[in-house]
Image (cartoon, helix red, strand yellow):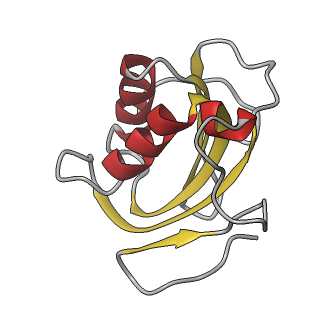
């Protein structure tokens, strides 16, 4: 489960404990970002917005509503582009209201094609 933080905080749950990757290393080129977004983020077009941002950045992955009211995002691609998506999650153009973003970096695993919106836990869907 992601770490807890104060409202409006961004929490980093780093999977690799050796610190940030060095420039030019394999992880610095391709990465997997998993983010959990808390706030008023369901039913407001948030998943559609995340998908459009991710596609604009050339990322692949999924965005899904969770039963507890959060939204989970799994994005893979260039690490800098994943970081740009992470920054946008708390930006002024985000639909709804984001109170907290918890995230984790991992090595890219592949196997993701396009960027798909899911309703919840494996259910395909569209909309907010």
x and y percent of residue 63 in the render?
Answer: 57, 36
- Which residue shows up at 66% across the image and 30% down it? 30
User: Vertical placement of 97 versus 81: above or below?
Assistant: below
Picture quadrant of residue 117: top right
Outermost residue, bottom side = 6
x and y percent of residue 83 in the render?
Answer: 46, 45
**Quick one: 126 or 28, which is closer to the camera?**
28
Specify whether 4 is left or right of 127: right
Picture quadrant of residue 55: top left
- Which residue shows up at 66% across the image and 51% down it? 21
- Which residue shows up at 66% across the image and 78% down it? 3
**Quick one: 112 or 122, which is closer to the camera?**
112
- Which residue shows up at 17% across the image and 53% down it? 92
Outermost residue, top side = 113
**Quick one: 18 or 75, which is closer to the camera?**
18
Specify whether 111 is left or right of 60: right
x and y percent of residue 99 in the render?
Answer: 37, 71
Outermost residue, left side = 92
């Amino acid at each position: 489960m992601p770490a807890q933080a104060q409202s409006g905080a961004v929490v980093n749950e780093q999977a690799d404990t050796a610190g940030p990757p060095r420039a030019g290393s394999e992880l610095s080129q391709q990465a997997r970002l998993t983010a959990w977004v808390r706030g008023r983020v369901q039913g407001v077009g948030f998943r559609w917005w995340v998908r459009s941002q991710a596609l604009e950045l050339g990322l692949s992955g999924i965005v899904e509503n969770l039963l507890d009211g959060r939204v989970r995002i799994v994005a893979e691609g260039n690490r800098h582009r994943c970081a740009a998506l992470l920054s946008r999650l708390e930006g002024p153009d985000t639909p709804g209201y984001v109170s907290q973003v918890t995230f984790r970096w991992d090595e890219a695993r592949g196997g993701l094609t396009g960027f798909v919106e899911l309703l919840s836990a494996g259910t395909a869907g569209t909309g907010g």
